[in-house]
Amino acid sequence: MFANGWWRWPLLPFAAFIGAFLGSMLFYAFQWFSMRFTGYYTEEGWYFLYVMPVLNAGIFGYIFASISYWFAPSHKFIAGVVLGTILGVVGLTIVVVGWIVPAVTTAEAISGTLAVAAWIAGVCFGLASAKDGDRG
């Protein structure tokens, strides 16, 4: 009954999101600890405020695409593309809302736009990497 892995399909979006969230939080924690122990930058500095969110968004997209590729029981690349497209549409919605809502500052809107671009790039790189790794 469970041999063909059909039960993984309904779990796939949740596993991809939870895994990507945990992975990006681990990456964030690594960056935060390296900031605290090395002292190269501070929490008020431009790196922590603008670069780290973009890097974390890229890692989120990469892990999301990799998990959606490897966790799918069949049609792995198509599953990764579909979930990556859904993630991209959600990200573009966030960007549009960020530019329209007057309470969001221009710096926050630019940062959100760059983060979503990194999100989408991470999905593309994650799918390409997973597909390339599956050949060998």
Image (cartoon, rainbow, N blue to C red):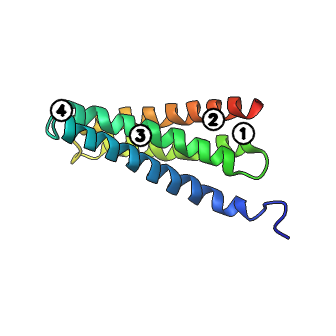
Q: Amino acid at mark 1?
A: Phe
Decide which of tag 4 and tag 2 comes sooner along the chain. 4
**Image coords of residue 28 (percent x, y):** 34, 44
Residue receiving disc 4: 41
* Distance from Cα at disc 1 to Cα at disc 3: 21 Å
Classed neighbour count for the residue bearing mark 3: other residues with Cα under 10 Å, few (<14), some (14–19), many (≥20): many
* Distance from Cα at disc 4 to Cα at disc 3: 20 Å
Which mark identifies residue 27?
A: none
Decide which of tag 2 and tag 1 comes sooner along the chain. 1
Residue receiving disc 1: 77
**Residue drawn at the location 64% of the way across and 30% of the way down:** 128
**Residue drawn at the location 52% of the way across and 53% of the way down:** 19
Q: Amino acid at mark 3?
A: Ala
Looking at the rendering, which quadrant does residue 135 occupy?
A: top right
* Distance from Cα at disc 4 to Cα at disc 2: 32 Å
Residue receiving disc 3: 57
Residue receiving disc 2: 127
Q: Element type at marker 3?
A: helix
Q: Amino acid at mark 2?
A: Leu
* Distance from Cα at disc 1 to Cα at disc 4: 39 Å
